[in-house]
Amino acid sequence: MSIHSHTFSSTKNTFIRWSTGLVLGAALMGSAVVAQAADFSANRIGFVNLERVLKESAPAKVSQGKLEKEFSTRQKDLAAQDTTFKAAVTKFQTDAPVLAETNRVEQQKKLMDQERELQRTQRNFQEDLNKRKNEELQKLIASTNKVVKQLATTEKLDFVLQNAVYVDPKNDLTDRVLKMLDSPAAQ
């Protein structure tokens, strides 16, 4: 019985030492967190709504106009091809009941080939458009980042964030970034 009470006492002492160490560690960590929070609040923080910049800035509008001009002819050609294809399908559906079997099969094959070609052309168009959109987006992001860095340096900011749950309006730099991007010096 003395072995059991000795083991229990030893376990109890170990538990007390471990608990005390845990409490002291938590207290030290708590004071470190408070110190870091105080240090963090001393930092100067800014925020830029990149989504707004990508929609509202003059360079974004110029880029959008450039893409529309560059791809409008191809888009009109695709629309015309689609209209022609739909008209051919409608005509086939009307004529199919009176066509000879071999003629009907031949026209059906032509329509399938035409549809495949139209889909391939549409896919190529979409890939080219997406590629150009990404190129223009990268240029716009690069120029926006340059302006944001310039503004952060001028204002002696420690952080500039692009995503946040809440932003105090005094820390929102978006309007200033838009003005700087819209200025003739930025373009």
Image (spheres, rainbow, N blue to C red):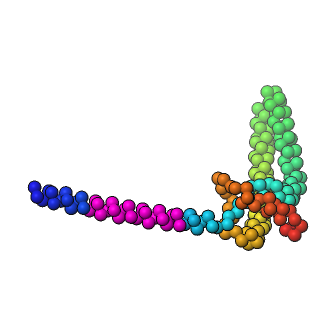
At a point 44% along the width and 66% down the height, the residue shown is 28
Residue shown at the point (73%, 72%) measured from the top left: 153
Residue 123, given in percent of the width and then of the height, sits at 75, 51
Judge whether 164 appears above or below 107 on screen.
below
> Observer-nearest residue: 184 or 67?
184
Residue 67 seen in this snapshot: no
Q: Which residues are magenta?
A: 14-35
Q: Quadrant of the N terminus?
A: bottom left
Q: Is residue 18 left or right of residue 54?
A: left
- Residue furthest top in the image: 97
Is residue 83 located in the magenta-colored stretch of the structure?
Answer: no
Work out whether 167 lies above or below 159: above
Q: Which corner quadrant holds the C terminus?
A: bottom right
* The image quarter in which residue 130 lies: bottom right
The answer to which quarter of the image holds residue 63 is bottom right
Horizontal and vertical percent position of residue 152: 73, 69
Q: Is residue 51 visible?
A: yes
Residue 16 in the image: state x and y as whole percent: 29, 60
Look at the magenta stretch and give its main secondary structure.
helix
What residue lies at 80% left-to-right and 38% top-to-bottom? 107
Identify the image quadrant of residue 106. top right
Q: Residue at point 86% right, 59% down? A: 58
Q: Nearer the viewer, residue 124 or 67?
A: 67
Image x and y of residue 149, in percent: 74, 70
> Where is 53 relative to 43, above or below?
above
Magenta stretch holds residue 31: yes
Q: How many marks?
A: 0
